[in-house]
Image (tube, rainbow, N blue to C red):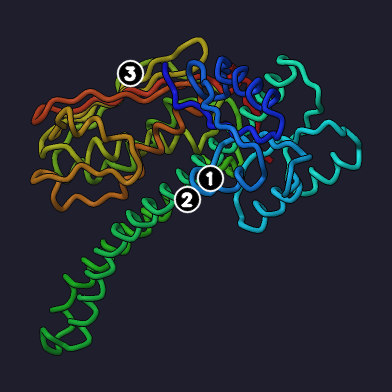
């Protein structure tokens, strides 16, 4: 794979040294961390400090090979000027006077490395290779920082959007009650109170889900690893949705089978089961059904939850496990959710060395399958 070459500026008042270094580097290529293929070098030459500063001002190089002893401005003078101008160029100081004092002075002024004359082609290549790796790591760090800023911005934007609508609704209901818009009879305002409580419950669920995701990702959640029966947890999860399912005449069934044992944090497996079962009821049709099948394995468990609900398109499936993603269409209008539940399921599955998958057919239903390996088999330990 071809990559844009690293730009190197060689500054030396000796033509032979300057041209020789240029020829060596133009034929040189390196393999760098996190970069596929090899990276070559584009070399420019300068015979004085003044010329070097002029070229740096026009196009900043990635690596500066700077002779210490130059006519006019010295190499240290050039370094001082770059620092004053806040020009961050990775500099390798070259000198025929390889004394400790010179090396210390150059390093204090920001030089990355030191190369003493006369040097061999292999010594030059080794020094430039080390400098190139540093440049690659700096770029990776900057990309990582930019990505963190972008994700933080998107996260805050989506969170603000998710909280704005319910807050506006509650505020509207409160203002209507404050203005006594329906008269003095308190019973008239009962629907407003009920809708406000529902909206507040949705916001509370969003905060709880957000804390769950944050604790899992940060590693700050205290994990209590023990031998658990996944089937017993599934029975408890089904009980939490039983009332809603019966109200909508949805049949919820845990298929029979032996106990399914694994080493895990009980609360994490509960999160997986509760999210899957709740969604299966929430996005189902009235009179539909939910089937939960557990699979006992030598090193863990498999969880399969199927529903006869509204289903999803291929485009919707591709977005499903991302944070704050909720499928919004005519069929899901009015169904509340945080958009964090399934991303949490995915993260927990990966925490146990497994994965979460989904298949769906619009208007026919959806099936989630989660593969979990025992923490014991994964060599996991509890976090203090």
Closer to the chain start, of discs 2 and 3, is: 2
Q: Residue 120 at what x, y percent from top left?
A: 76, 16
Which one is in front in this view, the residue at disc 3 or the one at disc 1?
1
Compared across the picture, whether 264 is left or right of 340 comes to right
How dense is the environment of label 1, judged by Cα within 10 Å: few (below 14), some, or many (20 and up)? few
Q: Circles 2 and 3: CB distance less than 8 Å?
A: no
How dense is the environment of label 3, judged by Cα within 10 Å: few (below 14), some, or many (20 and up)? few
Q: Residue 370 at what x, y percent from top left?
A: 37, 24
**Kind of element beneath mark 2:** helix
Residue sitting at 67 percent across and 33 percent down? Answer: 65
Q: Residue 290 at what x, y percent from top left?
A: 22, 30
The CA span between labels 2 and 3 is: 34 Å
- The residue wearing badge 3 is 256
Residue sitting at 79 percent across and 43 percent down? Answer: 107
Compared across the picture, whether 169 is left or right of 158 comes to left
**Kind of element beneath mark 3:** loop
- The residue wearing badge 2 is 211
Q: Is residue 213 visible?
A: no
User: Which quadrant of the structure image shows residue 303?
Assistant: top left
Q: Is residue 64 above or below residue 207?
A: above
Residue extending furthest top?
298
């Amino acid at each position: 794979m071809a990559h844009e070459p690293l730009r190197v500026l060689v500054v030396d008042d000796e033509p032979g040294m300057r041209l020789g270094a240029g020829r060596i580097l133009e034929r040189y290529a390196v393999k760098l961390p996190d970069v596929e293929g090899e990276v070559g070098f584009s070399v420019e030459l300068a015979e004085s400090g003044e010329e070097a500063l002029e070229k740096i001002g026009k196009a900043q190089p990635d690596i500066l090979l700077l002779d210490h002893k130059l006519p006019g401005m010295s190499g240290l003078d050039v370094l001082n000027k770059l620092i004053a101008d806040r020009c961050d160029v990775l500099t390798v100081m070259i000198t025929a006077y390889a004394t400790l004092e010179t090396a210390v002075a150059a390093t204090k002024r920001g030089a990355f490395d030191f190369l003493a004359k006369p040097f061999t082609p292999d010594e030059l290549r080794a020094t430039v290779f080390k400098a190139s790796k540093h440049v690659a790591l700096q770029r990776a760090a900057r990309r990582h920082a930019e990505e963190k800023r972008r994700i933080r911005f998107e996260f805050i934007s989506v969170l603000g959007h998710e909280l704005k609508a319910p807050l506006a609704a509650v505020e509207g209901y409160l203002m209507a009650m404050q203005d006594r818009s329906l008269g003095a009879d308190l019973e008239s305002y009962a629907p407003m109170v009920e809708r406000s409580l529902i909206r507040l419950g949705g916001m509370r669920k969003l905060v709880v889900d957000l804390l769950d995701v944050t604790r899992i990702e940060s590693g700050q959640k205290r994990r209590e690893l023990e031998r658990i029966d996944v089937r017993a947890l599934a029975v408890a999860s089904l009980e939490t949705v039983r009332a809603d399912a019966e109200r909508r005449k949805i049949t919820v069934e845990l298929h029979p089978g032996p106990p399914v044992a694994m080493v895990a944090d009980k609360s994490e497996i509960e999160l997986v089961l509760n999210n899957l079962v709740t969604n299966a009821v929430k996005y189902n049709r009235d009179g539909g059904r939910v089937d939960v099948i557990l699979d006992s394995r030598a090193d863990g468990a498999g969880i399969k939850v199927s529903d006869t609900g509204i289903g999803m398109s291929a485009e919707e499936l591709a977005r499903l496990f991302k944070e704050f993603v909720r499928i919004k269409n005519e069929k899901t209008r009015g169904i509340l959710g945080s958009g964090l539940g399934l991303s949490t399921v995915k993260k927990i599955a990966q925490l146990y060395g497994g994965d979460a998958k989904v298949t769906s057919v619009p208007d026919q239903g959806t099936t989630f399958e989660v593969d979990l390996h025992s923490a014991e088999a994964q060599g996991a330990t509890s976090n203090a």
